[in-house]
């Protein structure tokens, strides 16, 4: 049972391909002070996220949230897609704009998650 629950948690896809959405990957956004050892690595153990300068502040969470941003080497800017979506790291599988238990439609949830605006500041 535990492993079924874990697998569910580890594969929580959003409608990324259907909606041609790259909100989570371009750039990757994580809370400030994200631990270096959580950055996903490729098969050669090289980190696949490269840190950008500056921090993002979501306009609707100005007092509470600071986000670090990363460029992912697996993100293809020309197509807006992950180069290895099927094998993306666990941290990416867990990231989704969709909560399956929500009463809101996928469209509504996706729209809410991606409409947020940010302020960029120096760190
Ligand atoms: S916001 Fe949703 S659809 Fe867009 S990249 Fe993230 S998980 Fe995928
Ligand atoms: S590995 Fe793929 S899904 Fe994960 S951040 Fe990079 S481009 Fe996005």
Image (spheres, rainbow, N blue to C red):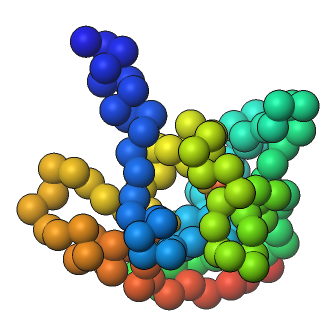
* Place of residue 54 in the rendered image (x, y in percent of width and height, measured from the top left): 78, 74
Q: Is residue 67 visible?
A: no
Which quadrant of the rendered structure holds the C terminus?
A: bottom right
* Place of residue 4 in the rendered image (x, y in percent of width and height, measured from the top left): 31, 20
Q: Is residue 51 visible?
A: yes
> In screen coordinates, is 108 left or right of 77?
left
Which quadrant of the rendered structure holds the N terminus?
A: top left
Residue pushed farthest left? 103
Q: State whether residue 29 is above or below residue 10.
A: below
> In screen coordinates, is 45 left or right of 29?
right
Quarter assignment of residue 115:
bottom left
Q: Residue at x 81, y 37 (%)?
A: 42
Of 42 and 79, nearer the camera is 79
Q: State whether residue 24 is above or below residue 100.
A: below
Of 1 and 38, nearer the camera is 1
Q: State whether residue 75 is above or below residue 108.
A: above
Q: Residue at x 56, y 65 (%)?
A: 24
Q: Residue at x 31, y 13 (%)?
A: 2
Instruction: Please state the total of marks drawn on the protein image.
Output: 0
Quarter assignment of residue 91:
top right
> In screen coordinates, is 102 left or right of 60?
left
Q: Residue at x 56, y 84 (%)?
A: 118
Quarter assignment of residue 87:
top right
* Place of residue 39 in the rendered image (x, y in percent of width and height, measured from the top left): 73, 42
Q: State whether residue 4 is above or below residue 15.
A: above
């Amino acid at each position: 049972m535990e492993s079924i629950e874990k697998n569910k948690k580890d594969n929580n896809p959003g409608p990324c391909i259907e909606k041609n959405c790259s909100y989570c990957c371009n750039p990757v956004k994580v809370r400030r002070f994200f631990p270096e050892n959580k950055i996903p690595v490729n098969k050669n153990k090289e980190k696949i996220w490269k840190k950008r300068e500056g921090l993002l502040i979501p306009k609707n969470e100005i007092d509470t949230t600071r986000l670090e941003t990363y460029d992912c080497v697996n993100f293809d800017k020309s197509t807006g897609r992950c180069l290895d979506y099927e094998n993306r790291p666990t941290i990416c599988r867990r990231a989704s704009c969709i909560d399956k238990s929500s009463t809101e439609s996928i469209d509504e949830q996706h729209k809410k998650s991606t409409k947020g605006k940010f302020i960029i500041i120096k760190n």
